[in-house]
């Protein structure tokens, strides 16, 4: 239930509900960059399905036989190929007896009798339908369509048992797809809930029906959030195209950009496999991680939900090289220092913006007071090794906020002195430009405390003063920090 509530609060919903439909095979969307022309995909994660329990259909009522006098207003009346007549109707006393106000039934019309096989309890009066299906999960039968929520339409698949009583084969919802998705020659059922936050597939294994909710299963094994890259009809020969939010729910409400990876899912009766561009593997070396330096070497550990114990740090690679300028500085032995080993940084901001690319601003005291040297480092191999990109020459104190947006763009705020010192780069950290906040009457005393990014906007939050007299303002840039305007 907790996972459901968290998922529900994220408004990433696809619109509408559609009736079951067979989808043509659609090739995987071309996610390739300009060079090279194609993307090589490889398996990033394979989850075995051996431990799945067989599907147990829910039962809304035990089938029974009733007379025609028990049938109130009819909401749906369909005759299927072969002559079977299926009806959905209100309880006859719904208008006179509050106990039956929302009661309705599904039944097979058999002359002067009704074989009731399912019950509904809701106030909905429209949206009910019946369609026949064939060769789905190895069976033939009929599917009833019933609204059961504001954004939930149920599609329940029924088959007849040996006595002619309808029995539930599978209960599905929203945008149901009937397609052979695992290549076993049998059409499976695939459907979504809450705009693809839950994507479920029902399949056969040795004539037994199983179902797997794929997105939650991925999240259980890798800290990511996966959503279909299109509707379910985009499931093609390669699998289901998906867009992966690295870091998953742990970063969904954090400021800054959200990095997505385009890949696809492939399902067999034995496993679920996530494929991503080959150059992004291994995913687990980056997604959902925090980064730091330990004795000068880059290290990471898993992000865990608040209140849970954090795991150990994992060292990724060799110690980070010392700044180039230290070779000529006879200051506390800097000229003899080759790496950050044995040196405790005064401040550190370290973040990945893709599986391969990351930023680090590392600071160390210089002289007395709050004076500091601030160096920018970059990684392009998933955090294993880091190279110096530049020194923030004008930043004489420690960083107080940072926003790393992609491989080229970043903004770093420095503790207040000489106005509000904030520096932006648009070339991967090689050069930095001091921001000019023209909306401020005076920059004196202001300091950045939060920098975030959404779409094409950078937001920076500033404050001035202390205690009850603290002032706040928020500025927006739509050109990567060249110009700023007050938030409306």
Image (spheres, rainbow, N blue to C red):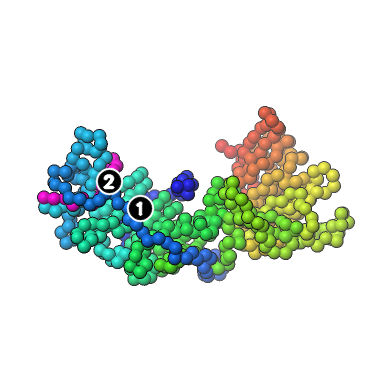
Are there few (<14), some (14-19), or many (20+) residues within 10 Å of tag 1?
Answer: many
Residue at the image position 76 percent from the left and 49 percent from the top = 346
Q: Is residue 313 one of those drawn in magenta?
A: no
Location of residue 262 with respect to 442 vertically, above or below: below
The picture places residue 231, in percent across and down from the top left corner, at 40, 57
Q: Quadrant of residue 330?
A: bottom right
The picture places residue 239, in percent across and down from the top left corner, at 43, 65
The picture places residue 45, in percent across and down from the top left corner, at 52, 65
**Label 2 with label 1: CB-CB less than 8 Å:** no
Residue at the image position 86 percent from the left and 59 percent from the top = 335
Residue that badge 1 annotates: 174
Residue at the image position 77 percent from the left and 53 percent from the top = 344
Q: CA distance from mark 2 to mark 1?
A: 17 Å
The picture places residue 388, in percent across and down from the top left corner, at 73, 59
Q: Secondary structure at mark 1?
A: loop
Q: Which residues are magenta?
A: 112-129
Location of residue 9 with respect to 277 vertically, above or below: above
Location of residue 199 with respect to 48 vertically, above or below: above
Are there few (<14), some (14-19), or many (20+) residues within 10 Å of tag 2?
Answer: some
Q: Is residue 245 visible?
A: no
Residue that badge 2 annotates: 120
Q: Secondary structure at mark 2?
A: strand
């Amino acid at each position: 239930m907790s996972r459901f509530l968290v998922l529900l609060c994220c408004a990433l919903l696809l619109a509408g509900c559609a009736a079951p439909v067979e989808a043509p095979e659609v090739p995987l969307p071309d996610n390739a960059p300009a060079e090279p022309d194609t993307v090589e995909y490889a398996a990033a994660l394979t989850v075995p399905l051996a431990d799945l329990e067989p599907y147990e259909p829910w039962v809304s009522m035990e089938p029974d036989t009733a007379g025609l006098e028990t049938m109130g207003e009819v909401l749906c009346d369909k005759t299927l190929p072969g002559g079977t007549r299926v009806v959905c109707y209100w309880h006859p006393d719904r208008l006179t007896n509050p106990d039956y106000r929302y009661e309705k039934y599904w039944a097979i019309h058999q002359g002067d009798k009704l074989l009731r096989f399912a019950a509904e309890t809701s106030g909905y009066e429209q949206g009910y339908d019946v369609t026949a299906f064939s060769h789905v999960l190895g069976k033939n039968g009929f599917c009833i369509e019933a609204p059961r929520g504001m954004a939930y339409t149920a599609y329940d698949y029924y088959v007849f048992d040996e006595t002619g009583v309808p029995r539930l084969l599978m209960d599905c919802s929203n945008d149901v797809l009937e397609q052979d998705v695992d290549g076993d020659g049998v059409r499976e059922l695939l459907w979504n809930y809450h705009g693809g936050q839950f994507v479920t597939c029902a399949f056969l294994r040795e004539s037994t029906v199983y179902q797997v909710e794929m997105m939650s299963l991925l999240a259980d094994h890798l800290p990511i959030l996966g959503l279909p890259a299109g509707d379910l009809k985009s499931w093609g020969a390669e699998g289901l195209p998906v867009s992966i939010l690295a870091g998953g729910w742990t970063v969904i409400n954090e400021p800054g950009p959200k990095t997505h990876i385009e890949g696809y899912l492939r399902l067999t009766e034995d496993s679920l496999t996530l494929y991503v561009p080959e150059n992004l593997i291994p995913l687990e070396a980056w997604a959902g991680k925090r980064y730091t330096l330990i004795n000068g070497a880059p290290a990471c550990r898993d992000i865990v939900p608040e209140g849970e114990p954090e795991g150990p740090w994992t060292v990724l690679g060799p110690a980070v090289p010392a700044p180039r300028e230290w070779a000529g500085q006879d200051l506390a032995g800097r000229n003899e220092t080759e790496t950050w080993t044995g040196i405790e940084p005064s401040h550190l901001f370290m973040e990945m913006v893709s599986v391969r690319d990351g930023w680090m601003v590392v600071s160390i005291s210089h002289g007395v007071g709050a004076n500091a040297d601030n160096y920018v480092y970059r990684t392009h191999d998933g955090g294993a090794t880091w190279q110096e990109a530049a020194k923030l020459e004008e930043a004489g104190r420690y960083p107080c906020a940072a926003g790393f947006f992609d491989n080229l763009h970043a903004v770093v705020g420095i503790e207040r002195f000489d106005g509000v010192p904030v520096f932006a780069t648009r070339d991967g950290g090689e050069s930095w430009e001091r921001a000019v906040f023209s909306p401020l009457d005076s920059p004196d005393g202001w300091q950045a405390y939060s920098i975030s990014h959404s779409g094409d906007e950078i937001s920076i939050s500033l404050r001035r003063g202390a205690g009850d007299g603290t002032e706040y303002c928020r500025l927006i840039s739509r050109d990567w920090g060249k110009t700023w305007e007050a938030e409306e």
